[in-house]
Amino acid sequence: MKKVAILWHMHQPDYRNPFTGEFTMPWVRLHAVSAYDDMAGILLDHPKMHCTINLVPCLLEQIEDYTKNNKSDPYLDMARKRAQDLSRQDRLFIVSNFFHLPKDTQVAAFPRYLELLSKRGDKPGDFITLAVKSFSTQDMRDLQTLFHLAWFGFVAREKESLLRDMTAKGKGFTETEKNAVLDVGLHRMSRLVKTYAELAESGVVEICTSPYCHPILPLLVDTNSAKRCMPQAPLPPRFSQPGDAKRQVLEGLDYVENILGKRPNGIWPSEGSVSPEVADIAGKCGLEWLVTDEGVLARSLGKPLSRHEDLYHPYSVKPGVKLLFRDRIVSDRIGFSYCRMEPASAARDLLSYVKTAVPDNGVITIVLDGENPWEHYPDRGKEFLNQLYNALSTDRDLEPVTVSTAARFGSKTLEHLHSGSWIESNFRVWIGDEETNKAWTLLGKVRKIFEKAKTGGKDEKAIEKAWLHLRAAEGSDWFWWLGDMFSSLQDPEFDRLFRLHLEAVLKELEEPMLPELNNPVSRSWARPPVEPATRLVSPKIDGTTRSYFEWLGCARYNVIQARSSMYKGENIFYAVLFGFDEKRLYIRLDPHTSDVLNGMQGRKIEIFFNIQHKYACQKENPAADNVGPAVLSYSSKGLNIEFIKDRKALNPCPIDAAALQVIELSISFHVLGAGPGDKIGFFVRIVENETEIDRLPPGGFLDITIPGDDFMLTNWSV
């Protein structure tokens, strides 16, 4: 009899802002009410089916954060707002982001949803602000509802009468109905972990896991190991932390055992990434098996793969540790091809492939993402999975088994283990290009500071808190989206979260911030929408707007226009004006309300400067030349101003500032160490209780070049 071991991998990166604990993106919640719910629910209907579910600890932790700690995310917050109360900024956000679903399979399932997409346009681009104006209050409420209704999986729609009723209604939703739909999602999410625990207890499912925050283990052990599979690739300064790799594995095992009641026997090492050192760590952590891709096996054997003879059995790589290799052909068919076939035909094709390819008493290992493929299947894969599970459960020649069971069916010894992942059998996705190497360099710098603090007698509680953020920064997803191979609309947010986790490490250790963490790693950051400066300005710094002409011709950053992105701050200021004369830089912050200063009590405004010199020889590393922040705080006693340089506040402060109707400040180019032709970049942070609550712009810097003698000639106008 031929054994079929299917492993469904469930994973999301840590979307929580490390300073506030709030979710910045909704994908844990939305996948929870769709694929995670479906994959558990359908197995309850197939008690003779056996498979393995890989649940990554940082995913489970986030699910529990939603359900036990009542956490929210920007999408849920926007959906909860009454449609009639939505601001222009809110409407932009919703119309921009509430169509993040496949059009043909999910949007088109709701005629009203498709109508709203047609009104907005498939790719509205710069016309989004015009499109938003055409949306009525009822349009907005229907969009808030339909986005979340469309995300539900087939199990929820079958089990929840409210969802069936709302689907039948289709449009014209009330606020009460909208909130009821959102509540159903949170309710179903609250039962997920318990359902998976029950499936594991019944024996239908084996639960395995991955290292806690899904790092690429071989690179965590030693980034130089990438040379084994990528000998020509440029690599960052060496990062080698085998202790971190082992700790991530052990903490992942501990967490899953704690919440699901049983310690996993094996792991899917993140992205199927293995190396001899990782196999050694697996043995030391008490693991029985690992799974990776068939390409790694071919390179380990050093010869073209004979699938029939080489692929369909486990291998011993260390005493007590087995390695199984996924069949790439059939795994990829499920992930990418079967969605275009009639479900029964797709299931028959899979069974036919297994019966033809696998020898008698052989084991085929099928491994793939358990969440994303179903968005492209009719009815989220319901009929295909039913057909597949029924067939596997009843076919006399096939036996569905868990990976632990499969690992016991004989093995050969693998004398050499190739270092690589399931993608191209190398690590090119996560290292070796400009952006990923820069990210590893930043991680390495912060890791050295962490190590010095750990061995230097720093408080143990601070060390443990810092480790949680470092652990998150070691995750694979930041590198996945930063690299050249993959991209998404949320690239800037992944970039920002990665750097925020590193900032949080330094904060917990009470170490000074690295200036490099202020600079985006990704090249995909769009330039902030800035109206350029056209003339010199010399405004009086008094905090008022008494004269229109004082700031005429300055550069202007439109905060509202930038707020259509994923990043959402406190929305205190609507514009940043900045300009210069021959000697000084001037900055003005325009608040939404006249009483903003009262709202600023207990908060600080930090303005960070970055100088890029016209001639690189002026500084050893001009791009990272951070001269320190200007810090403004407001209390009942008035405005307090500091300028920090070399970790010390300069006294007297070389900054003029005032705050009444607006906040204004000026600082001389001499103090900034800059001259004609140099570029000054700056960003503004609003901080409360040492936590960033807003940043302008959300990524990168507002740039201005110090004028030379020809500025007025080249910008002269009547």
Image (tube, rainbow, N blue to C red):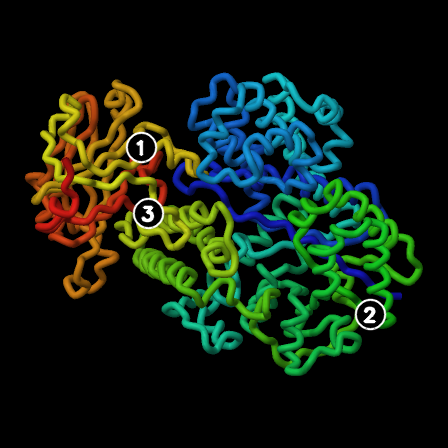
Give the residue furthest to the right. Answer: 396
Residue 664 occupies quadrant:
top left
Q: Is residue 36 left or right of residue 690?
A: right
Q: Residue at position x 72%, y 41% from top?
A: 38
Q: Position of residue 643 (x, y in %)?
A: 15, 41
Sequence-earlier tag: 1 or 3: 1
| Foreground of the two, 542 or 210 | 542
Q: Which quadrant would the N terminus be assigned to in this image?
A: bottom right
Marks 2 and 1: CB-CB under 8 Å? Answer: no
Q: Could you tell me if residue 616 is visible in this image?
A: yes
Look at discs 1 and 3 and give the one toward the viewer.
Answer: 3
| Foreground of the two, 45 or 586 | 586
Q: Position of residue 191 (x, y in %)?
A: 67, 35
Q: Residue at position x 53%, y 48% from top?
A: 13
Marks 1 and 3: CB-CB under 8 Å? Answer: no
What residue is disc 3 on? 700
Q: Is residue 430 left or right of residue 343?
A: left
Q: Position of residue 542 (x, y in %)?
A: 11, 26
Amino acid type for the residue under numbered disc 2? Ala
Sequence-earlier tag: 2 or 1: 2
What residue is disc 2 on? 357
Amino acid type for the residue under numbered disc 3? Gly
